[in-house]
Amino acid sequence: MWRYCLLPGLAVWLAAMSPAQAFIAYVSNEKGNTVSVIDTDSWAVTDTIKVGQRPRGIEFSRDGKFVMVAVGDDDTIDVIDTAKKQVVDTLPSGPDPELFTQDAAGKILYVANENDNTVTVIDLEKRARLGDIQVGVEPEGMAISPDGKILINTSETTNMAHFIDTAKRQVVASVLVDSRPRFAAFKSDGSELWVSSEIGGTVSIIDPVKHAVTGKIEFSIPGLRREAIQAVGIGITKDDKTAFVALGPANRIAVVDATSHKVTKYLLVGQRVWHMAFTPDEKYLLTTNGVSNDVSVIDVAAQKVIKTIQVGELPWGITMSPR
């Protein structure tokens, strides 16, 4: 029988010539009532999926088979089958769901309901509502600690970050931050919680054990009024060294040294940048730009915008395939 093998050098060369792994991003278009699907190999929209009214918060299931999107005006969570590219189910939330997060196992979903000041707890396997947790006024930001023991909710009008014990399902501490907190993110080692304040224009650094603000990141861009610089989405690299903060109508992403908490650079992106998502390999960061109806692609290592992708009307949230 005739056999052959590749020489080691040739094998390396062929591997280098193979295309990089493509990931898939889903973008919620708040005014268009659609979700745009982006292929990161071609950097192009490959599908547009019709969903319910006013889609905002969006996230892949842990297994990558489904995408969940909060459709605020329908008071529910639409579930998209990623193979069929269509809505196949809904989940029971409270009124006007906005952002949500899930536990590490992908079994429990926690949803911030803006209109009734609660966080709804949903069993994803049973598609059943397990109960509600009372929080502050206009809850939005959601994050879960790396160990899964603490859930964070930010309330826009109460101006607080609420610490919720996931076992007891009750608030155990609340920390006052600057005006209109919109997003929360833990460092991967759990040492810090970052909370963005839209009207305050800052990011508060919170000690998750002491429940205390230990520092604040402020932003200053020449030629822009302070009120135009509104901190919203946050992305922190897995090594906890670099963070990116979306600055809303300032049309900038701030690059922050996550150790010193100093801003090192501003990147000009589309108009009214809101949320962001890394590709799983963290080579790229994609941002949603609501007013210009597009997505900016940032080369993370180079800290440079390399591409703009047109999507639907008023892009708001974005999620990336887990693999």
Image: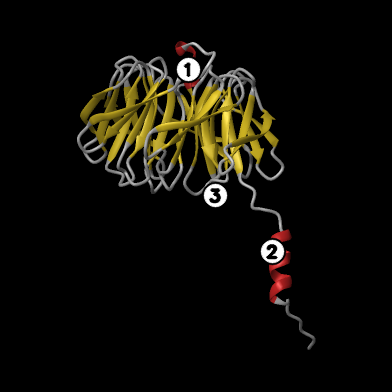
Which residue carries the number 3 mark? 281
Q: Can you tell which of label 1 and label 3 is closer to the viewer?
A: 1
Q: Residue at x 64, y 48 (%)?
A: 22
Quarter holding residue 53: top right
- Residue under the image location 56 percent in, 44 percent down: 301
Q: Position of residue 132 (x, y in %)?
A: 30, 28
In three-dimensional space, the C-alpha distance between marks 1 and 3, rounded to whole angstroms, equals 29 Å
Query: Where's residue 17, x and y in %?
Result: 73, 59
Marks counted in the figure total 3
User: In this view of the protein, which residue sits in the foreground, 189 or 51?
Assistant: 189
Q: State which tag comes first along the sequence, 3 or 2.
A: 2
Amino acid at dot 3: Asp
- Residue tagged by mark 1? 229
Would you call the spot at circle 1 few (<14 residues within 10 Å), some (14-19), or many (20 or more)?
A: many
CA separation, marks 2 and 1?
45 Å
> Is residue 111 in view?
no
SS assignment at label 1: loop
Give the alpha-carbon distance from disc 3 to disc 2, as whole Å. Answer: 18 Å
Q: Picture coordinates of residue 44 (x, y %)?
A: 71, 37
- The label nearer to you, 2 versus 1, is 1
Task: Residue at the far right: name it.
Answer: 2
Q: Secondary structure at mark 2?
A: helix
For marks 1 and 3, the one nearer the N-term is 1
Q: Could you tell me the amino acid type at mark 1? A: Ile
Can you tell which mark lies on residue 56?
Answer: none
Task: Point out the tag, 2 or 1, that comes first from the N-terminus.
Answer: 2
Callout 2: 10 Å neighbours few (<14), some, many (20+)? Answer: few
- Specify whether residue 170 is in view: yes
Residue for badge 2: 15
> Could you tell me which residue is drawn at 30 percent across and 36 percent down?
151
In the rendered structure, which amino acid carries the disc numbered 2?
Answer: Ala
